[in-house]
Image: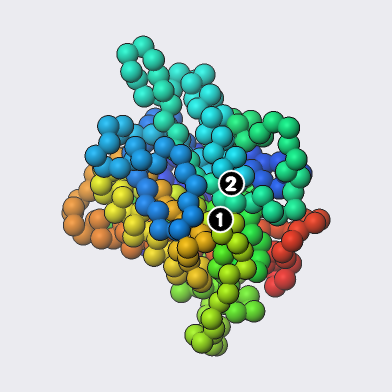
């Protein structure tokens, strides 16, 4: 596999990403959308998730496609970002048709960033407005680092952020990932600059440092955040035609990417989840072999996106943690 032209999730043709953030708040919203509804599923492995409208993504539920997916800061307050995205979609005439009514379908997930030093003393919840702004900003370009929902993200030792990566498989299918890294665990090995995801790096996308001489296999990590403060939320996408059951399988496989890139991951204190989406533009040639290849690619691409998000984070006054670039770059 090779990176797509942008090395972003928007290499899956038709998908668009928008960010909106408030630097004083140290938080923001990231939206994935498209010009037409797309199939989606979700798989949760963390012990402290925060979600909206995820039940309807199960394979046995009526709604077959969504209009947007929302990744937001703000903990439970951030779920209101979906309201803003729904309003913008409704104004554009989008949504699930029920007679003459249209109901935009906008699942979402949140990270906890309420203790990152930002001004959280708002009189009105800021996330609906941030959701509207992120949807309106959606395009083929996808900024990474301290933007959107990753504006105030933290990890075990370094600033987190938004990451994205893509791959084009030998058979022609494209797989992309978009992630907000706010993990309890570390994306880097020990006290050094090397990324756990280094074995899957392509084209020196996060520094090309390779592997360290030694892994701290005997290290016993302690939680550096409290219950509910950590979460890594992600979207993997493909143009391969997968139904909701196939996408749920893809999301499950993609979790391997989080485990490769964050140590530890999927803890009781994290809310780790992965959405999977398909534009359905490319038919499967081999229903077994293609699905096998897509699952492997999703895990590899998501691991790369995690490292990219941490590598791209920038330093700002008042940071509670250093960025990777400030410490090692």
Please say whether residue 19 is visible from this viewpoint: no
The numbered mark at residue 75 is: 2
Q: Residue 84's spot in the image, x, y percent? A: 56, 29
User: Between residues 312 and 12, which one lies in front from this camera angle?
Assistant: 312
The location of residue 286, given as percent across then percent down, is 18, 54
The residue depicted at 37 percent of the width and 48 percent of the height is 42
Q: Is residue 166 above or below residue 199?
A: above
Judged left or right of residue 224, residue 261 is left
| Residue in view at x 67 percent, y 34 percent | 126
Q: Nearer the viewer, residue 140 or 318?
A: 318
**Gap in Å between the C-alphas at discs 1 and 2?**
9 Å
Q: Depth check: 326 or 105 in front?
A: 105
The residue shown at (24%, 56%) is: 290
- Which residue bears the numbered disc 1? 228
Q: Quadrant of residue 277?
A: top left
Q: Residue at x 51, y 59 (%)?
A: 270
Image: 99 above or below 8: above
What is the quadrant of residue 88 in the picture? top right
Q: Residues within 10 Å of mark 2 (few under 14, many from 20)?
A: many
Q: Secondary structure at mark 1?
A: loop
**Residue 271 or residue 157, whichever sits in front:** 271
Among the two numbered marks 1 and 2 on one chain, the one whose residue lies closer to the N terminus: 2
Q: Position of residue 31 (x, y in %)?
A: 53, 39
Position of the C terminus by quadrant = bottom right
The x, y position of residue 61, in whole percent, is 27, 36
Query: Label 2 near label 1: C-beta < 8 Å?
Result: yes
Tell which residue pokes out farthest to the right in this image: 317
């Amino acid at each position: 596999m090779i990176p797509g032209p942008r090395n972003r999730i928007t290499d899956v043709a038709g998908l668009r990403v928008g960010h909106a953030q408030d630097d004083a708040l140290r938080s923001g919203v990231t939206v994935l959308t498209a010009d037409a509804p797309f199939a989606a599923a979700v798989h949760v492995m963390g012990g402290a998730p925060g979600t909206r409208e995820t039940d309807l993504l199960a394979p046995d539920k009526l709604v077959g496609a969504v209009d947007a997916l929302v990744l937001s800061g703000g903990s439970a307050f951030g779920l209101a970002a979906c309201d803003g995205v729904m309003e913008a979609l409704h104004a554009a005439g989008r949504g699930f048709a029920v007679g003459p009514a249209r109901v935009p379908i906008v699942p979402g997930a949140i990270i906890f960033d309420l203790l990152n030093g930002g001004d959280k003393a708002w009189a009105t919840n800021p996330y609906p407005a941030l959701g509207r702004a992120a949807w309106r900003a959606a395009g083929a370009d996808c900024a990474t680092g301290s933007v959107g929902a990753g504006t105030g993200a933290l990890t075990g030792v370094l600033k987190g952020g938004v990451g994205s990566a893509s791959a084009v498989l030998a058979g022609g299918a494209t797989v992309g990932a978009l992630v907000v890294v706010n993990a309890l665990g570390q994306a880097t090995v020990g006290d050094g600059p090397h990324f756990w995801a280094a074995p899957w790096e392509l084209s020196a996308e996060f520094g090309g440092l390779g592997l360290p001489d030694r892994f701290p296999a005997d290290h016993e990590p302690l939680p550096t955040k409290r219950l509910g403060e950590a979460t890594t939320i992600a979207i993997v996408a493909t143009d391969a035609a997968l139904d909701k059951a196939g996408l749920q399988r893809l999301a499950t496989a993609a979790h391997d990417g989080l485990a490769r890139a964050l140590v530890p991951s999927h803890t009781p204190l994290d809310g780790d989840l992965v959405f999977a989406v398909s534009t359905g533009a490319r038919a499967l040639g081999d229903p077994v072999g293609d699905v096998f290849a897509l699952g492997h690619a999703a895990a590899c691409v998501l691991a790369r996106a995690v490292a990219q998000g941490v590598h791209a984070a920038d330093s700002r006054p008042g940071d509670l943690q250093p960025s990777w670039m400030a410490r090692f770059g």
